[in-house]
Image: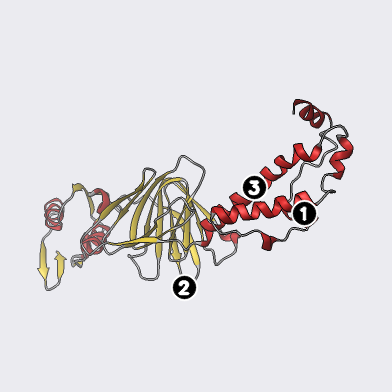
């Protein structure tokens, strides 16, 4: 064998090194129909037996090699190598074929109104899911399968391997292997909002050309309109979009009109500023897991105004 390796080494430029399974099978009159790609050992052995039989019956398949190695029983030495290469290819094909032909199975989780959950999908993937949101997670996360989400979610992904994770919401696929990002399709029925907290995330609509792919970096926000098939990006310095996850609510010299707009959306209670002179008053405060009464009391004391309930609305005067 050592002599054989030396001969191959000395003549490596004269020997074809590329291996094409189609060419090999055609050359030896072996049909693909003879190879059964079912995931059973008996079928694999049957396929190998068929190939070996064809090799044994063909006296010309190593004619070129024979001219290079005239003093060696080439068939005895090289046939095991040839068979081993075909064996590896067949087994690999069987495994990969069966992996991809089976339908992906998902676990679907929905969050009721007023609730929120944290999901540790793997050691490298964690998802926070807000109220009235749904997520579909593939049971075999390593099969390059995507996660589907509808609603409001925050992802922390830190995959040590280069393999990227795909997250799909409203036909937009978010792809990354290391990033923290936010998705919200609940705020407006005809809109999807995404923001990157750390790292970078690629956005792509598979129904549009690849040239429409976008890369969102830290601090950037994307707004997608499914009707117009348009994605707008901007730098966004807002800090309260994750209050449902962190419990931290902060206003830093924020106009009262902006404060009441946020409170109306977050607490689902309309807040109306009746005294228009108060619209641009600046409000600064930080709250942790606060209820709306605590916030309104702080606004009333700091801005010297009165807040009263008027039917289904809260009125600031």
Q: What is the crowding at mark 2: few (fewer than 14 residues within 10 Å), some, or many (at least 20)?
A: few
Q: Position of residue 151 (x, y in %)?
A: 34, 63
Q: CA distance from mark 3 to mark 1?
A: 16 Å
- Please indicate whether residue 59 sits to the left or right of residue 145 in the image: right
**Residue occupying the point 12% across, 57% down:** 293
Q: Nearer the viewer, mark 3 or mark 1?
A: 3
- Please indicate whether residue 58 sits to the left or right of residue 37 in the image: right
**Residue occupying the point 72% across, 43% down:** 82
- Please say if the residues under marks 3 and 1 sit with CB atoms less than 8 Å apart: no
Dot 3 corresponds to which residue? 87
- Please indicate whether residue 247 sits to the left or right of residue 59 in the image: left
Q: CA distance from mark 3 to mark 2?
A: 52 Å
Badge 3 marks a residue whose secondary structure is helix
**Residue 146 falls in which quadrant of the image?**
bottom left
Q: CA distance from mark 1 to mark 2?
A: 50 Å
Dot 2 corresponds to which residue? 227
Q: Position of residue 36 (x, y in %)?
A: 61, 60
Question: Looking at the figure, which quarter contains the N terminus?
Answer: top right
Dot 1 corresponds to which residue? 23
Question: Looking at the figure, which quarter contains the C terminus?
Answer: bottom left
Identify the mark nearer the N-term, 3 or 2.
3
């Amino acid at each position: 064998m050592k002599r054989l390796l030396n001969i191959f080494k000395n003549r490596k430029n004269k020997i074809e090194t590329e291996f094409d399974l189609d060419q090999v099978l055609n050359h030896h009159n072996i049909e693909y129909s003879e190879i059964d790609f079912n995931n059973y050992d008996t079928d694999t052995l049957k396929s190998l037996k068929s190939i070996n039989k064809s090799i044994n019956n063909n006296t010309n398949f190593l004619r070129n090699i024979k001219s290079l190695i005239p003093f060696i029983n080439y068939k005895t030495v090289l046939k095991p190598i040839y068979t081993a290469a075909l064996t590896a290819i067949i087994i690999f094909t069987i495994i990969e074929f069966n992996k991809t032909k089976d339908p992906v199975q998902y676990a679907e989780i929905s969050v009721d109104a007023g609730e929120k959950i944290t999901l540790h999908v793997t050691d490298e993937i964690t998802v926070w899911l807000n109220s009235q949101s749904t997520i579909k997670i593939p049971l075999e996360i390593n099969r390059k399968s995507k996660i589907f989400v509808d609603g409001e979610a925050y992802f922390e992904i830190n995959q040590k391997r280069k393999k990227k994770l795909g997250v799909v919401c409203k036909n937009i696929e978010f792809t990354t292997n290391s990033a923290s990002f936010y998705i919200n399709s609940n705020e407006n029925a005809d809109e999807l909002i995404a923001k990157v907290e750390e790292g970078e995330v690629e956005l792509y609509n598979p129904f549009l050309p690849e040239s429409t792919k976008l890369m969102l970096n830290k601090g950037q926000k994307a707004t997608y309109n499914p009707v117009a098939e348009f994605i707008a990006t901007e730098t966004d310095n807002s800090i309260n979009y994750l209050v449902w996850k962190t419990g931290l609510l902060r206003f830093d010299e924020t106009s009262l009109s902006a404060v009441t707009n946020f409170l109306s959306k977050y607490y689902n209670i309309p807040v109306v500023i009746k005294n228009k002179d108060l619209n641009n008053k600046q409000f600064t405060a930080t709250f942790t897991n606060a209820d709306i009464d605590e916030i309104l009391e702080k606004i009333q004391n700091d801005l010297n105004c009165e807040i009263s309930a008027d039917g289904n609305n809260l009125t600031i005067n």
